[in-house]
Amino acid sequence: MRKIVFIGVGGFLGAVLRFYIKNLHLSGGSGFPWNTLMINITGTFALALILTVAYEVWEFDSGIRLGVATGFLGAYTTFSTMCKEVVGLITKHYYVSAGFYIVLSIGIGLCAGYLGVVIARELVSKLVKSGGADDLDAIE
């Protein structure tokens, strides 16, 4: 039951943040879905960073890990919206924009995931090994 509460609270917070960012005016009237791209890229980075830390550097409580990864980031990121927006661009005959969006989403997403893993392994592990992570233990 505890894990379900963590997932539910994380999901609520992730969905609210996604809603807020989705309604920011980032496109400048271009119609390109910059908001969703930013949401998915930052979510990918955060997921890679957090799960790498949780499994390789510093073991998180499983409820917190599920709340953040499955709940918060699962609700924050949105593959289905990206697909819907690609279809919308195609139906408006913006084929180049649709292709560009797919390539950016996948390419930058993979880079963000890789960067999250690298940062977790290098910087966070140095922090933990140097003893500067005493405050992190309070989260458990």
Image (cartoon, helix red, strand yellow):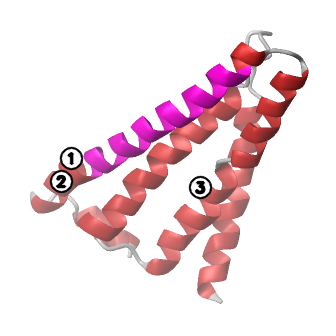
Q: Is residue 138 magenta?
A: no
Give the amino acid type for the residue marked by disc 1 in the picture: Leu
Q: Marks 2 and 1: CB-CB under 8 Å?
A: yes
> Foreground: 128 or 109?
109
Q: Marks 2 and 3: CB-CB under 8 Å?
A: no
Q: Secondary structure at mark 1?
A: helix
**Is residue 85 visible to us here?**
yes
Give the amino acid type for the residue marked by disc 2 in the picture: Leu
Main secondary structure type of the part rendered in magenta: helix
| Quarter-of-image position of residue 129 | bottom left
Residue 77 x/y as whole percent: 64, 48
Q: Quick one: quadrant of the C terminus?
A: bottom left
- Label ID, residue 123: 1
Q: Which class describes the residues within 10 Å of circle 2: few (<14), some (14-19), or many (20+)?
A: some
For mark 3, what is the residue? 73
In the image, which residues are magenta?
98-120
Mark 3 to mark 1: distance in Å? 22 Å
- Label ID, residue 127: 2
Q: Secondary structure at mark 3?
A: helix
Q: Which class describes the residues within 10 Å of circle 3: few (<14), some (14-19), or many (20+)?
A: many
What's the residue at 65%, 25% (across, down)? 101
Q: Is residue 61 above or below residue 76?
A: below
Q: Quick one: quadrant of the N terminus?
A: bottom right
Q: Marks 3 and 1: CB-CB under 8 Å?
A: no
